Image (tube, helix red, strand yellow):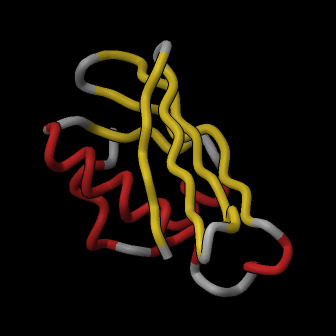
Amino acid sequence: MEITITERNNKGFAIARENGNKAGAMTYSIASKELIIIDHTEVEPEFKGKGVGKQLLYNIVEMAREKGIKIMPLCPFANAMFKKNEDIQDVLKK
């Protein structure tokens, strides 16, 4: 699984691909230099249940750690993942 993160015009896009096929995407808004807001997660039907959403989230969490920023998870999937996984709560906007 290859995941790329790109940003433009105050939006961020994490795209997961496997063998050149899009597996899923997670988008976020750049609210400030210190905060991003995850607003949407989608996984292609043939990749459901394979951990694509979690991989996307963990890649964004790693990027947030590197930049020293916090994450506000408005997306229901991302919000549930933050509640369930203590290992990523260090970047959670409280």
| Residue 93 in the image, given as x and y percentages of width and height | 33, 39
As drawn, the residue found furthest toward the bottom would be 50
Quadrant position of residue 6 = top left
Of 54 and 87, nearer the camera is: 54
As drawn, the residue found furthest toward the right would be 45
Q: Is 67 situated above or below 30?
A: below
| Residue 69 in the image, given as x and y percentages of width and height | 22, 35
Q: Quadrant of the C terminus?
A: top left
**In screen coordinates, is 1 left or right of 67?**
right
Quadrant position of residue 23 = bottom right
Q: Is 66 situated above or below 78?
A: above
User: Which residue is at 37% across, 41% downward?
Assistant: 71
| Residue 28 in the image, given as x and y percentages of width and height | 52, 35
Of 7 and 69, nearer the camera is: 7
User: Which residue is at 66% across, 53% downward?
Assistant: 41
Of 6 and 77, nearer the camera is: 6
| Residue 2 in the image, given as x and y percentages of width and height | 46, 68
User: Which residue is at 58% across, 81% downward?
Assistant: 51
**In screen coordinates, is 84 left or right of 59?**
right
Q: Is 81 situated above or below 47?
A: above
Count of numbered marks: 0
User: Which residue is at 53% across, 40% downward?
Assistant: 13
**In screen coordinates, is 42 left or right of 10?**
right
